[in-house]
Structures are given as structure tokens and as C-alpha cells.
Image (cartoon, grey):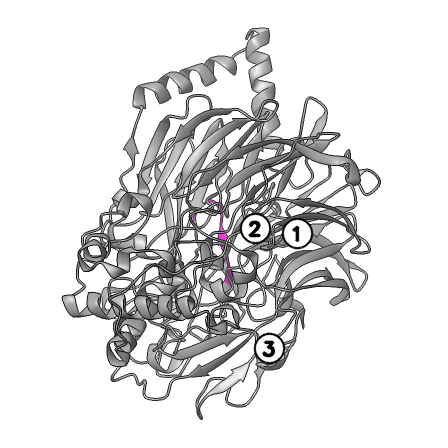
Amino acid sequence: MKHTPRYAAPRLMLVAALALALTSCKGGSAQDADGAEADQQWLAQLDDGSDGKDWPAFGRTYGEQHYSPLNQINDGNVDQLGLAWSVDLPPGNPATGPIEVDGTVYLASGYSVVRAIDVETGKVKWTYDPRAPEASGIKLRQGWGSRGIAYWNHKVITATQDGRLIAIDEKTGKPVWTAETFGKDDPLFISGPPRVFDGKVIIGNGGSDESPVRGFVTAWDADTGKFLWKFYTVPGNPADGFEDNAMKMAAKTWSGDWWNYGGGGSVWNAITYDKANDQILIGTGNGAPWNHKIRSMGNGDNLFVCSIVALDAKTGKYKWHYQINPGESWDFNASMDMELADLEIDGKPRQVVMTAPKNGFFYVIDRKDGKLISAEPFVEVTWASKIDLKTGRPIEKPNVRYENGPVTFKPTPIGAHSWMPMAFSPKTGLTYIPAIDLQVTYDDTGITRENFKWSGGMGLSPGVGYSIGDAGKKITGWLVAWDPVAQKARWKIPMEVHLNGGIMATGGNLIFQGRPDGGFSAYNAETGKRLWNFDAKAGVVAPPITYRVKGKQYVTVVAGIGTSAGLFGPMFAKYGIDYRTQQRRVLTFALGAKGTLPPKTPYKPVAFDDPGYTPDTALGQKGERIFNVRCAVCHGTAAIGGGTAPDLRTSAIPSDPSAFASVVKDGALVPNGMPQFGEFTQADLAGLRQYIRSRAEVLRKGSQEDVAGSVMKPGD
């Protein structure tokens, strides 16, 4: 595949390069000196030990700690924190991490629509829309837009659903360069934040739940968009040769003709730059398909699926790896954020990387060589008894690979921790985790390597049936303060729902986190006592940031429900979250501010009128199978919307065959983010309509099924 960047303004870059050269000459003006000092300021902010003036990257610094040393807002005065300003956002994914540099907040909501907002006034300075839905084709069928953006040398860098990496001028909002990170027809998409390091920007992609992809990351020159290097995470067909010795080594851990059945290892989220060792750490995703028996005949560890892999930052060459789940079979990927720290363990200083991946164990790993230091469960874990510290491998429970029929255990494919980032505070020495407590049942009865087929068109294809539920529990999540040295919880707070927001820790002895119920709270970082709560009038799952402008500390978070949270409509129904009516806002707080928000209008779903509806069980079941594979990930389990996309039970479109075909088959709403399914037959459309209309009928009759539990079976 060729990597050919499209240069939007080569003349502008030439002028910029000349200007940079001139400022480096002796005898530059005072203004030149000020500019050079400003350049050093933003660059210095990326170091883990920086003063916290700005928040220029997804995790603030290279080490991804989601920690700021700022303490003007602290545990003694946080009760005086108030709303300074808010900016309303249009429909689209609001679950995204903002950044801030030199008095301007930048964020990418929806499908990577980037906005620049002046911190002091709350006014939008510019908006850039890359028109990603129109460019995405079938790539629009997975993902919801970007979870975050990056900053380098006066450029805001965003990645789009269709695979573009775009650098935008911080002042004008105009593209400086654009690069295509994968081919137009590749069954891939981007939802994770790009990361910057040493003049480079690195990005991965997703797709391992839908296609037999080979995961990879690519690195690009952050100033010009020039392609630098690429690293694959799983091997391809040996007949084609191996790209490097790492792939040759990895191929020995796969069995059968794996290249015809799958792959995986997508790097869709976790990327961390270890400046001290000049290496990039990537967290890889699940196998494709999940079922190890199909993917690799049930044999082999399948490197580098579900692993942390260290790469030389300059060349992209393999250095070391640690595999979280050998022979992964449950979507227990290692794509949750990885945070760097220097800890004293057994009386010795250690450079470590910490992660709380989906499988429920908290890992502390030596980042110099990838050796496991410790691993303990931070939630209830029933799939494995422990992690063997000598081998680094989990001790699995019987039948955990569903080899002898259905099996139920904790945690689930959602994970004990999802993409919402945890935070590490060097001040308290604790890591704060938005943990999840649910259980799953797996069953691959009737699914074999011989009869397995990919759904095609980026439809979910795990190769195993599964269901996720809360079993009527009142607590399905936790806010956990975890001691990474002692490997135990110092305190934890129960949450009535899972998928609570990303976390930020501060030098003011505070941690901040939002919740789907609309609360945005500050807690004492040492005790867990809640000290402040703001009613955001909308769910908050995005990670907050803090920074200082002209001596004043601010806190910013984006409110609104998006990404995979919308899948769990039944669990969120009690909060009245609706795609069409929920508010999406950028909220910024400061001490003594007195801003207010308009009241939230209560929402209760009302089924559309459908006087012509007639039950048809067989047709509805056909539609349910299609819905689970193609639609549920956005429109919600059992067609109960959770805020990511419209609740179809309340839309009149399914009652009209022509209108339904126009939207679903012809793509009338692609610019709004609704994918086109041009391959659907009239029978497919009829089945889908029947299923949705049947779910509306349940709502119309007021069945309790609409507010109980949550179950999904995309493996059907």
C-alpha cells in the first residue's frame, strides 16, 4: 500500500520553514525570541514533569497519566467551583477528550468536527468539518467518530472515521496537510486519538470485530505529513514473506492457514510514548474472530494479539512484548490506556507501565524489558484464578474457552475497564479506575471452523454467541482507587451503572469524573469522599481536563452520551437519555463562577403510531438477527436507544417501507452518520422493519422488558 500524503499548502510550509530557520539565527528580534519561547512552552508541556499550564495531549503528557499538578482548585475550595461558560454542540458523538494550549480549548466531536474555543470568553473561534461520513462508505458502519485529538507545533491533529490524518492550523482552522493512513477499500476505521512524540504522530485503527484484518500502526512526520514507518501486530500469509523478524517470530505462535480465517490485534486506542527509553508502547486488540478455535485451530498464543508491544520510536522496530491474554478468546483486548510512572517496588526504583485491561487484572510491567512485576484483580474476576508471575500467563478456570459448552464468568467483552481513561496521581501514588462489574455467557454451539463465515460489510462477526447482563444487580460499576505497589484497593465507590466517565487527577488532592446520570463530581483523592457535584443536565462519559490561563485554573469536560455506551439502552433507560433531545455541551468551570444551564426536559420514549402492524414471529426473528449484527451497536440492545443513535421505536420511518428503504438502503441520512446498506434485499428490509415495529409494539403496551436488564447476542 502506498502512503502518499496530500499537501494542502506546500508554499505555506516552505514559508514556515524559512521563518523557523530565520528565528534560529543570531540577532533575531525580541518578537522572534518570544515566539521561540512560546514554542518551547508547548513542547515542554508534553513532559510528565511539566507545570500543568496546558493540556496538549489526550492524557496531558507523553506518560498518559491524566494528571495535572495544578492545585489552585483543591480539596479545600472545590465547593466554590462553578460554571464559567458552556458551548452547545450539535448531534453527534460528544464522548471525546478535549485538549488546551495557550488559552484555547480544542475538541473533535461528532465525526471529527474540530472546534477551537477561547477559554476566557467561551466563544468558538473556528470550526473545521472533514466531512467524514460522506467519505467513509461502509467504514461508517462501525465507530462513532474520534475520542480525542493531539497538538504539535501550532497544529491540531485529528483522525477521521475514513482513515485520514489531518493537521489543522491552530489560528485559521484550515488544513495544513492530510495523509491517508489506509486504503479506501480496507475494512478499517479510526476512533482513537492520535498521539504525538518527537516530531511524529502515530495512529492505529479498528476493525477486528468485523473483518479478518491485520492490525497495525503508522507514524508520520507531524510537520509535513510524510510517512515514516509502519508496524503490523499480527503476521500475514507466510508465502508473501514477513515484513520483519518480529512477524517471523509471531507466525510461530499461529496454527493452520490463519491468514484465510482471521488475524486481529487492532491498535484502536492505547498508545503511549516512553520518552526515557525512546520507545512507543502500543496496546493491541482482540483476535479476529474472537473464537480461537476458528482463528487458529485453538492452538498457539497468537502474537501479538492482546499484548503490549514496545517499538523503537525512531524506526518502529520491535523491542519487546508482554501478552496479556495468550490465545485470546473473549475480546479481552489490551487496548485500555497505559500509564507510565517511576515507582519504588521492593526498595528499588522501577520504570513501569501500568494498565487495567478488559480482563480485570491490574498489571504493573517493567517498561525497560517488558517483564511482569505484578498483577492482581481490581474487580471480581472468575475466568482465571490468578496471573502466574513466573510465566506471566493467566491460570484459567475450567471450560473458560467454552470448549465443553456454555460458560458464564466475569468480566465481559465490555471489560472490567473500557476506553474511558483511568488516572494516576504521583501525589497520592494511586491509580483511579472507572471499573465495570458485569457478567457474560459464551456459547459457540453449532459454530465451527468449517461453517463460520464473516458477515461481510463490517458486520459484527465474533465467531461465538454471547450475552451480557447485569442479572438485576444494583451495582454494575465502581470508582476504584488502586495502589499499584501494594496491588490492592485503598477505597472504592459503588456506581449503579457501568461505563462511567474517564478520570482526571490533580495536585489539588482531587479526582474528577462524570456519570451517565448527569453528575460531574470531584472527590478527595485520598479518601474518596465526594466534595462537589454539578448537574450537567446530560450524561458525562468523556475525560475532563484542567489548565491555567492568566493565572486562573479551569476545568473542562464535554457532556453527552456517545460511543459504545449507546449499546446499553436498557441499563440507561432510567436516565431518560435520547439521541434527539439530549444536550451535548462543552462545560468549563472556575472558582467563583456562577453560570447556570437551562433545565433538562424530562424524556420518556413514546412509540410511533403503527395501526397497520401485524405480528409475524418468523419475520421478526430474521430481522432481529440482522439488527444484532448491523444495528444494535449504535441503536441499542433490543432496539432500546442509549443516546448514541436514535431510538428506532420512537421513529415513524420503520412504519413506512419507502421511507425506511430510502434511509437504510439508499443512504439518505449518510451526512448525519447513518450508514448505507445498499446490499440489503427487500426481504432483509422487511425483516428489519418487522423487528423494529415489534419492539415499538412492546413499548406501546408498556412492557417492563424495556427497562429491565441488558442482553445482547450479536453472535446469533
Image coordinates of residue 259 in percent, x first then y, are 28, 71
Select label 3 or label 2 by which is in front: 2
Say which residue appears at 50% left-offset and 48% top-offset: 95
The tag on residue 539 is 2
Determine whether 56 is above or below 324 in the image.
above
- Tell me which label, 3 or 1, sits earlier in the chain: 3
C-alpha distance separating marks 3 and 2: 42 Å
Determine whether 263 is above or below 130 in the image.
below
Select label 3 or label 1 by which is in front: 1
Q: Residue furthest right?
A: 76
Instruction: Write down the residue under mark 1.
Output: 423
* Amino acid on which the number 2 mark rests in the picture: Gly
Q: Is residue 74 magenta?
A: no
| Closest to the observer, 614 or 383 | 614
Q: Magenta residues? A: 308-315
Type of secondary structure dominating the magenta stretch: strand
Instruction: Write down the residue under mark 3.
Output: 391
Specify few, some or many for label 3: CA neighbours under 10 Å numbering under 14, 14-19, or 20 or more.
Answer: few
